[in-house]
Image (cartoon, rainbow, N blue to C red):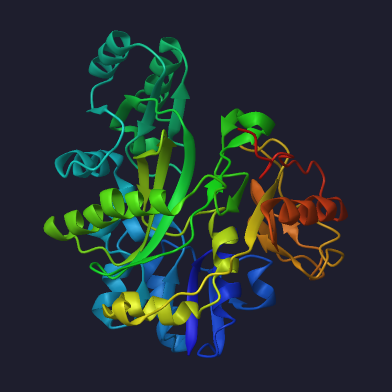
């Protein structure tokens, strides 16, 4: 069959890479894709949110399956559109995608169905938010309600920082309309992790969990990013914790969404905090994570296409998923200046020199004059990934190979998967 992957990041390159392994797939398109997808798929110069142009391409190319990577087209109703045309598409409907597109909706759902999460209040008034912050005192977490490319969460260690964050979101519109409402919540302490599960709205098929690193610098210093690296599985994750996550969070959430008339069919991504063997929800996302996708899908031994159709057709109970026991680690190589302003169009070199058992998934790249000389085209440029018997073995492979890759101003964290209690 012919498959279209919507998006242009490292998550989408990973999806293209994994789908290409299926014997059911004959041809893959990526819209718009990047220099990495161009090596194994046909890139289409179409924005992920341009549903009309995507529809035309699907008809013209006779595409038989669509897999959506990023959150914006999901929130924009891409799944609803193609469901009406009868083309199988993987992702939640617009109504179901609200679990990510609106943090206020997500928080209200959690509270209504008593799913464990941080205590919080939602505000549409800057004055009311300010009064609440002064009354509560720091530390606090301030979140923009809408989509903000993974950057709409501010951890405020002081009252002044919290007030500044609310002002930036609601008054200065740092994240546009996403900051019309803000959520102010208690800061949870513990170990943060990401849990993923496929679901057809009723059956749940767990994926493998991961941990990501959001701050730009080693030691979790500096501003938040879209993610600077990740590893799977979390070293602290136990079968008892997984049982707790499934029974107190994932299963109740899927049931709650059905009760709310928002049947959820996709992969559900739960950002969690673990402390003293108790788990609470930080947030939900309605798609594969990035950079977590790059360290979870390489561990999948089963055919991703079979799982996807189990989700779409509502018969996930007949599908099995086999996962590698190996650990997987990914390190993001970013442009100088990221997550602030950065230069693009810089040539990359050395991509043809990395070891064969090391994967390089492209994020912000454009096709250069040679396959091994992609041009930088974003803040996060590449994710270098490796499997190993242990996370330490995998990270050693990665950090031995990163020096072979070069683009001007390349920055990356040196502490991914370096564990300290």
Q: Residue at x 24, y 77 (%)?
A: 84
Q: Residue at x 65, y 39 (%)?
A: 419
The quarter of the picture where residue 348 lies is bottom right
Q: Residue at x 37, y 80 (%)?
A: 319
Q: Is residue 404 left or right of residue 291?
A: right
Task: Tally the numbered discs.
Answer: 0
On the question of residue 150 being in view, the answer is no
**Front-most of residues 208 and 26:** 208
The quarter of the picture where residue 137 lies is top left
Residue 311 picture location, percent across and down: 33, 74
Residue 33 picture location, percent across and down: 58, 67
Is the residue 351 above or below the residue 185 in the image?
Answer: below
On the question of residue 327 being in view, the answer is yes
The quarter of the picture where residue 130 lies is top left
Residue 273 picture location, percent across and down: 42, 38
**Front-most of residues 193 and 10:** 193
Residue 219 picture location, percent across and down: 65, 30
Is the residue 255 above or below the residue 56 in the image?
Answer: above
**Which quarter of the image is occupied by the C terminus?**
top right
């Amino acid at each position: 069959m012919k498959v279209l992957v919507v998006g242009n990041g490292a998550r989408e390159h990973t999806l293209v890479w994994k789908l290409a392994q299926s014997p059911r797939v004959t041809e893959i398109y990526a819209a718009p894709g990047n220099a990495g997808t161009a090596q194994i798929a046909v890139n289409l110069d179409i924005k992920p949110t341009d549903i009309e142009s995507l529809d035309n391409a699907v008809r013209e190319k006779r595409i038989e399956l669509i897999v959506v990577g990023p959150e914006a087209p999901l929130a924009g109703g891409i799944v609803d559109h193609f469901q009406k045309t009868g083309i199988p598409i993987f992702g939640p409907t617009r109504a179901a995608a609200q679990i990510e597109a609106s943090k206020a909706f997500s928080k209200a759902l959690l509270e209504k169905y008593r799913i464990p999460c941080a205590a919080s209040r939602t505000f549409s008034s800057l004055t009311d938010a300010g009064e609440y912050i002064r009354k509560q005192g720091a530390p606090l977490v301030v979140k923009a309600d809408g989509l903000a490319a993974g950057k709409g969460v501010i951890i405020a260690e002081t009252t002044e920082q919290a007030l500044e964050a609310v002002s930036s979101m609601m008054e200065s519109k740092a994240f546009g309309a996403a900051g019309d409402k803000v959520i102010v919540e208690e800061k949870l302490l513990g170990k943060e992790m990401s849990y993923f599960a496929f679901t057809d709205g009723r059956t749940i098929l767990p994926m493998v969990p991961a941990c990501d690193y959001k701050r730009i610098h080693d030691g979790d210093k500096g501003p938040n990013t879209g993610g600077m690296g990740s590893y799977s599985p979390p070293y602290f994750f136990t079968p008892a914790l997984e049982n707790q996550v499934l029974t107190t969070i994932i299963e109740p959430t899927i049931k709650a969404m059905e009760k709310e008339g928002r049947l959820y069919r996709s992969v559900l991504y739960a950002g969690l905090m673990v402390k003293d063997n108790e788990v609470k929800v930080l947030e939900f996302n309605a798609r594969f994570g990035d950079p977590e996708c790059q360290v979870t899908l390489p561990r999948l031994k089963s055919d991703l296409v079979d799982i996807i159709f189990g989700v779409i057709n509502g018969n996930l109970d007949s599908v099995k998923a086999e996962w590698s026991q190996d650990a997987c680690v990914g390190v993001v190589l970013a442009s100088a200046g990221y997550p602030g302003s950065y230069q693009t169009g810089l040539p990359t070199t050395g991509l043809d020199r990395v070891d064969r058992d090391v994967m390089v998934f492209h994020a912000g790249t454009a096709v250069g004059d040679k396959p091994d000389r992609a041009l930088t085209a974003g803040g996060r440029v590449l994710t270098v990934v490796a499997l190993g018997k242990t996370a330490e073995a995998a990270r050693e492979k990665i950090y031995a190979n990163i020096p072979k890759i070069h683009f001007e101003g390349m920055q990356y964290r040196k502490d991914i998967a370096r564990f300290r209690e």
